[in-house]
Amino acid sequence: MKVIPNTASVGITGFESPAAEYIQRPLSLDELLIAHPSSTFFGHASGESMRNVGIFDGDILIIDRHVTAQNGDVVVANYNGEFVCKLIDTVRKRLLSANDEHQPLVIHEHDQFCIEGVVVSSIRCHRPSPLLTASI
């Protein structure tokens, strides 16, 4: 975590507060995590196939349709009618898991395939949220 230097006044006389050298900058998670609001949607990760890139079962995925997928990106794709979260191998036309227990999916000409968006961030909740449990 990067601390942003700023000047803060504490209103206490005597010893200077350690916080006196820091400014508090407002933090908007919307601005931090969502670059293109009109083309961003959320997904819910299921399974362990992406654990080696830090995406675990139950994580929230922030998916941006505006971003063009590049080789090695984590994408959400519609592969033969099923939504999958995988690494895209554009050179060999494959979808790769980030878990050695899962085999690559080769994208053939006859497959129905469409990239829905690039996963730009993921969020892990360490306590259950009523907002999430109601929507899942």
Image (tube, helix red, strand yellow):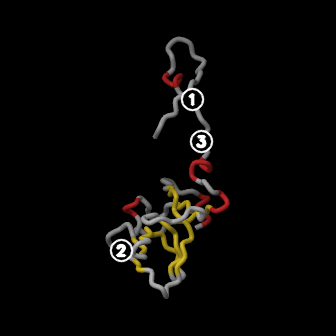
Q: How far across and down, in percent of the image, does residue 3 sit?
A: 49, 34
**Residue 102 tag number:** 2
Q: CA distance from mark 2 to mark 1?
A: 47 Å
Residue 110 vertical position relative to residue 89 in the rendered view, above or below: below
**Residue 23 tag number:** 1
Q: CA distance from mark 3 to mark 1?
A: 12 Å
In-front residue for pair 26/68: 68
In-front residue for pair 30/58: 30
Badge 3 vs badge 1, beta-carbon distance below 8 Å: no
Badge 2 vs badge 3, beta-carbon distance below 8 Å: no
On screen, residue 108 versus residue 43, left or right, reads: left
Answer with the quarter of the image where residue 116 lies: bottom right
Residue 34 vertical position relative to residue 56 in the rendered view, above or below: above
Q: Which residue is mark 3?
A: 27
Q: Residues within 10 Å of mark 2 (few under 14, many from 20)?
A: few
Answer with the quarter of the image where residue 134 lies: bottom right
Quadrant containing the C terminus in the rendered view: bottom right
What kind of residue is marked 3? Leu
